[in-house]
Every structure is written in C-alpha cells, then in structure tokens.
Image (cartoon, rainbow, N blue to C red):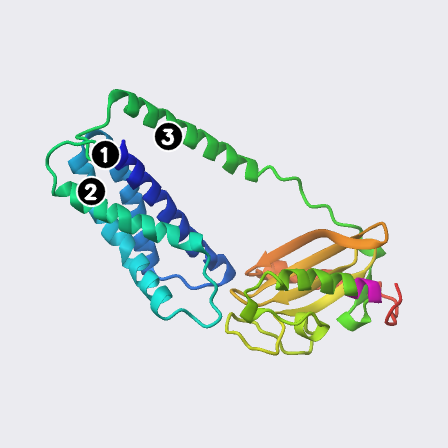
Amino acid sequence: MIPFAMLFVTAVLTGWQLLYRIMMAIWGAPNYWLHFVSFFGSLVILGAAYVSVWSRRTGLRVAIVGLIATGASFVPALVISLISPPAHAVYRWYLFVPSVCLIVTTVYVLVGLRRPNESIWYPASAARASKVGILLFTIGAAVTSGWYLRSLGRQAPVSLPSISSYQLVERFANLPADSQQAFLAVFAEREAKQPPGLRRSATRRMLIAEPDEAFQATDIVEHGKPERRLIFAAIGEEPFVLYEHGGRGLHLHALFLKRNGSLFVVSRNLVFTHPTPDTLDTLSQLWRTLRSSARPANEGEV
C-alpha cells in the first residue's frame, strides 16, 4: 500500500503541473519536447503504482524509468528557481510540492530496490483488502472525472443584449465617466493580484491604452505600458469594452458591465484566445453594425 500511495501521489502532482504547463500553449506560451517526455514519465509512474500492488520490486523498477523522465524537466527547473530566480519572481510554496514529492519518491524507490527483504515500508505486495480498496478508489475516481468532464459541456449558452440598443464608442476616454470608473476599477482589482514588482498604478494610462497607443503585447515586461489596449467600446443596456490583452499569449476580452442599484458590476467576461479569421470577421461585423447605427457621442453622455 505504501509504494502505491507514494507513486500515485507523485504521478498525479507532477502530471498535473506538467499538464498545466503544456496547456498554457492556448495562451501562446511555447512548449518544449522535454515537457512531453516528462508528462509521459508521470504516466509511467502512475502505471508503476498499480504494478507495485501485485509486485513491489517490479513496480519500483518500472517507476525508475518514469522518475528519470519526469525529473528531466523538474530538476533543471528546480535548480534554476533556487539559484537564479527571474527578477520580480514570486514563488508560492505549493509550486514546489510536486518537486519535493519527486525527490522523496526517488529516494524511496532507490532504497527499496536495494532491500530485497519484505518489511512494513517495503511489502512484497499489497494485502487483498488493500487491492480491493485501490480498485474501488480507481473506479470511483474514473466515474467522478467522467461526470465532471461531461458537465463542462452542459453550460448554458451566453445570451447577449440586442446590438440595436448600443452606441459605438471608439475611444475609452469617450465613455461616460461612471462607466470609465467602473471598468478601471475592474482592471485595478485584477492588477492588484499581480506580484508587487509587476503591478501598475491604477490610472487610465497604465491600465488600458487607447486604440492608437502602444501597449505590452508580450510577456516581456515593459514598464510604463499597460497590458490592455482598447479595440472599441459600446454604450447600452450592458456597456462593454472589447480590448486586446497582452502578457503570456495575446488574446481578446469582451468585458460587460450591468447596473446593480447605483453601481456597475461585471456581467460577463468573454475571452477569445488565438482569434481565428471567423472570430475576427464576427467582431468586424459587430463593429460595422454598431458604427452604422451609431450616433455622435460626447464624453460623459450615455
């Protein structure tokens, strides 16, 4: 049971962190072949966990292959993070938990391979009750995961207000004063979650650029430039801004607000990652529709 638990936990934690890193490609972050090798290593460790239930030594031998593959990306990353961390880097303790598990499990496996005799920490195989428990745990985890993944596709469709009730605004400064303040408050709240060295001041110039102004389109920090740049905005039942958001992968946001008494609150935040030609064409049509029905808008008017 102990070999299974250690190998299973290590496989899940390292695999999850690697999968998260690989999936960051949807935001434009580059992937390296070593990440895929290490993720395959996590799968091998997971398989070794189940093999160890019936044969400890065979499971540990299989685990060695997975530990080497997984450590190929974890060890260099851990060394670099400890010796020469990037400027303004803020590391949270839980980010190191998979690496610690990998190190502890590697030591456990190496010691276990040198101990041919059975002991409490290194049983030859799991007891029958443990095997049944592991089987039930696996079935339950599989059913729960399947139910959760199916539920992701059952989200209610997004309903948007009628476009005919909107008025096009092509500069952020031309939005009504209360809408400007509400949007800037949302941006400032999200900016406050950044590491201290990367936070921008809560001013319009540092939170969102006008369409003709420069902004930080990549994850290379350029102090003095905001991460957002307006494409266009609209005033209506739920005022919204469509803007580019740089950083780790350029993408688009359509941020809607709605009134809650005398205050504005976020109604919905639609994200377009890697906009396709169809998406851009749809946004262009939206802009043309708003423009064709637009009335002259002076700053501060609704």
Residue 135 seen in this snapshot: yes
In the rendered image, residue 296 lying in the magenta stretch gets the answer no
- Residue to which mark 3 is pinned: 138
The residue segment tinted magenta is: 176-180
- Residue to which mark 1 is pinned: 51
Residue at 30 percent of width and 63 percent of height:
76
Image spot of residue 99 (x, y percent): 34, 53
Q: Amino acid at mark 1?
A: Val
- Viewer-proximal residue among 301 and 99: 99
Label 1 to label 3, Cα distance in Å? 14 Å
Left or right, 300 with reference to 224: right
The answer to whether mark 1 and mark 2 are in CB contact below 8 A is yes
Quadrant position of residue 123: top left
Left or right, 239 with reference to 302: left
Image spot of residue 46 (x, y percent): 30, 40
What secondary structure is the stretch in magenta mostly built from? helix
Q: Secondary structure at mark 1?
A: helix
The answer to whether mark 1 and mark 3 are in CB contact below 8 A is no
Residue at 31 percent of width and 22 percent of height:
132
Label 3 to label 2, Cα distance in Å? 20 Å
Image spot of residue 231 (x, y percent): 69, 68
Q: Amino acid at mark 2?
A: Val
Tell which circle, 1 or 2, labels the residue nearer the N-terminal end: 1
Give neighbour class at mark 3: few <14, some 14-19, many 20+ (Cα, 10 Å).
few
- Residue to which mark 2 is pinned: 62
Quadrant position of residue 153: top right
Residue 210 seen in this snapshot: no
